[in-house]
Amino acid sequence: MRVHLGCDHAGLELKSHLTSWLTDNGYEPVDHGPFVYDALDDYPVFCLRAAEGVRADREAGLDSLGVVIGGSGNGEQIAANKVKGIRAALAWSEETASLAREHNDAWVVAVGGRMHTIDEMTRLVEVFLSTPFPGDERHVRRIGQMASYETTGELPPLPESALGHGEA
């Protein structure tokens, strides 16, 4: 599996560690930078490229996921989610890392380089990468609603239980 990586200065140490860890564990890392420490770098430059790499691979039929890393992971997740078709999730525990795949079929995981140790963050990435999306109908339906909205801009219809409560 190919794994696209992007970060900012706060994630540089983990990205360097992950590149080796991924190779040692049979993954193919694709590093979108940065490659040197710059306290003033901008995470969108690198995280957008990582997410674009995942999307391009998946459109080509390749098995590919992504990891974006920053101080908290929040901005990196937001940046990755701006790439059309990408679902990026912020993971802060093993459970959130696995649920991102199991329930949301997330293709990119964001982690906070200042929130965890390198070993903890490596474990979050490991859980994310090794968890399959089982394709349960309810999750496929929900993902489909988001994908449709992203394409059309039309909100999904309200269920019967919500009708008459402010929106028609």
Image (cartoon, rainbow, N blue to C red):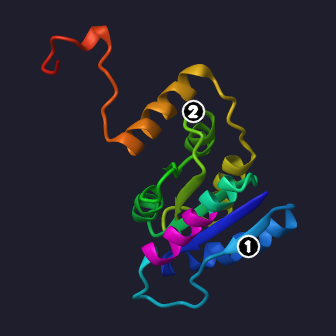
Identity of the residue furthest to the top in this view: 160
- Given residues 129 and 53, the one toward you in this image is 53
Q: CA distance from mark 1 to mark 2?
A: 27 Å
Stretch in magenta: 44-53
Which of the pair 138/56 is nearer the observer?
Answer: 56
Q: Residues within 10 Å of mark 2 (few under 14, many from 20)?
A: some
Q: Pointer 1 and pointer 2: residues touching (CB < 8 Å)?
A: no
Judged from the image, the secondary structure of the residue bearing numbered disc 2 is loop
**Which residue is under mark 1?**
19
Quadrant containing the C terminus is: top left
**At 43% from the left edge and 85% from the top edge, which residue is drawn?**
41
Task: Give the amino acid at mark 2.
Answer: His
Residue at the extreme front = 152
Question: Which element type, helix, strand or loop, lies under badge 1?
Answer: helix
- Return the residue at label 2: 103
Q: Is residue 81 left or right of residue 138?
A: left
Q: Residue 160: percent from the left, percent from the top? A: 29, 8
The amino acid type found where label 1 is placed reads Thr
User: Position of 72 compared to 2: left or right?
Assistant: left
